[in-house]
Amino acid sequence: MISLLLLVNILTCGLDDAADWSQWRGANGNGTAASTANPAVSWSATENIAWVADLPGKGSATPIVIGNQVIVLSAEATDKPAEKIAAKRADSKTEPPNVYYRFWVTSIDRTNGKTLWQKLATEQVPQEGTHPTHTYAAGSPVSDGQTIYASFGSRGIFAYSLSGDLVWQKNLGEMNTRFGWGEAVTPALAGDLLIVNWDQEENSFIVALDKKTGEERWRKDRPGEATSWNTPLITTVGDRTVAVVNGSGKARAYDCSNGNVLWECGGQTINAIPSAVRFEDMVVLMSGYKGAAAYAIPLAATGDVSGTKQIRWSHQEGTPYVPSPAVSGHRLYFTGGNSDILTVLDLKNGKPIAQKQRLGIGNTYASPLVAGGRVYFVGREGTMVVIKDDDSCEVLSKNTIADTFDASPVACDNQLFLRSWSKLYCVQQQ
């Protein structure tokens, strides 16, 4: 039974709902925090740390913030042995584990870092291994403010109430990824639908689930698509809700009401991971593994726009591999490959504002955050840089916490949340 303290935290926490970070790239899907966000500029392992919460197991999923709750996903290896499973694909470079894993959904009180509730979604043996820099909890949760949707990919999708009660769960089958490098299935909400992109080495598809029941509303094959680890951008065109989905074969825009393809665009690199971002009446799609590609496409485009004049502009240098870009005003911020080489483009014409600027944070998987007139970049080994959110890109601070960070930073009000593989840090001016 829900405790009185938890009920008070949920219903009367006094925090502005507009400041919530309800999905992995924020309310607008572009890495920009609410206008009320004003996080600290400098911190260290001992400076401006309000609290640190230990998490069970490991994870690289970006947390979300709903009211007083920070929701974090993780996967914990147990000592419970399992029968050895052979890799399902001949090209696999990883071995499935021989122990059971526990897959956790944890709610943390953002005021003090204490656990409000923690739910064991499932205990299973993953059918694949993971890349050494990957975890079994890489897909981020999403919420409509009433229900939390947590995806562990092949292990299932789970819907919880804000008090941690299981509402429904859904199994979409087992995913087979390139080289057995692992999964990162992050759902996206579109009205009363939960859109799930399921790109794998064979039989890729996109599916819409009823957010209240988990039942399928529609499912569409994604021909020519292999493993991509990308997340749909949900946006609107007139009175139509659209899911824009990246892809190594073709990026596509789907009508969320029925799954029909509205337009498509080829030319991305393989392993097309970055999510699309919107600027005015267009979207920008990027990829950066063994090549570089960025295309600005009108949302009202039709048909196959590959190589046509429907494309507003393109950019073929320094685009990201794992991180997604961030948008602030007319500026598009991104780093090249998984490096710390910053490029800033003018979204109106695709021309560089800044280019080949080294940030000094080493390799990065985390996507940049825009908050409080600043842009935050997080390196994998815990070095983080804050720059001015203007055309100067002036470096304001360099900060270090010795830990492994792959999740993207999140800002709500005066708090900055940094999720490492095993901890959640709350940075707050002291």
Image: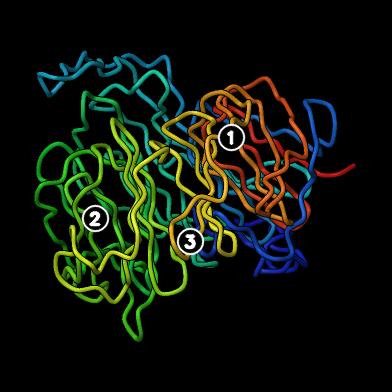
CA separation, marks 1 and 2? 28 Å
Residue 314 lies in quadrant: bottom left
Residue 77 falls left or right of residue 111: left
Q: Position of residue 263 (x, y in %)?
A: 20, 68
Measuring from the top left, give residue 289's x and y in whole percent: 31, 33
The residue that appears at 59% across and 21% down in the rendered structure is: 381
Secondary structure under the numbered disc 2 in the rendered image: strand
- Answer whether labels 3 and 2 touch (C-beta < 8 Å): no
Rendered image: mark on residue 357: 1
Name the residue located 21 percent from the left edge and 29 percent from the top edge.
Answer: 178
First-in-chain label (3 vs 1): 3
| Of labels 3 and 2, the one closer to you | 3
Residue at image x 47%, y 65%? 348
- Specify the label residue 100 is tagged with: none
Where is mark 3, residue-wise?
347
- Left or right side of 195 for 225: left
How busy is the neighbourhood of tag 2: few (under 14 within 10 Å), some, or many (20 plus)? many
Residue drawn at x 84%, y 36% is: 48
Q: Secondary structure at mark 3?
A: loop
Is 188 in front, or is 355? 355
Residue 424 drawn above or below residue 250: above
Q: Which mark is residue 251?
A: 2
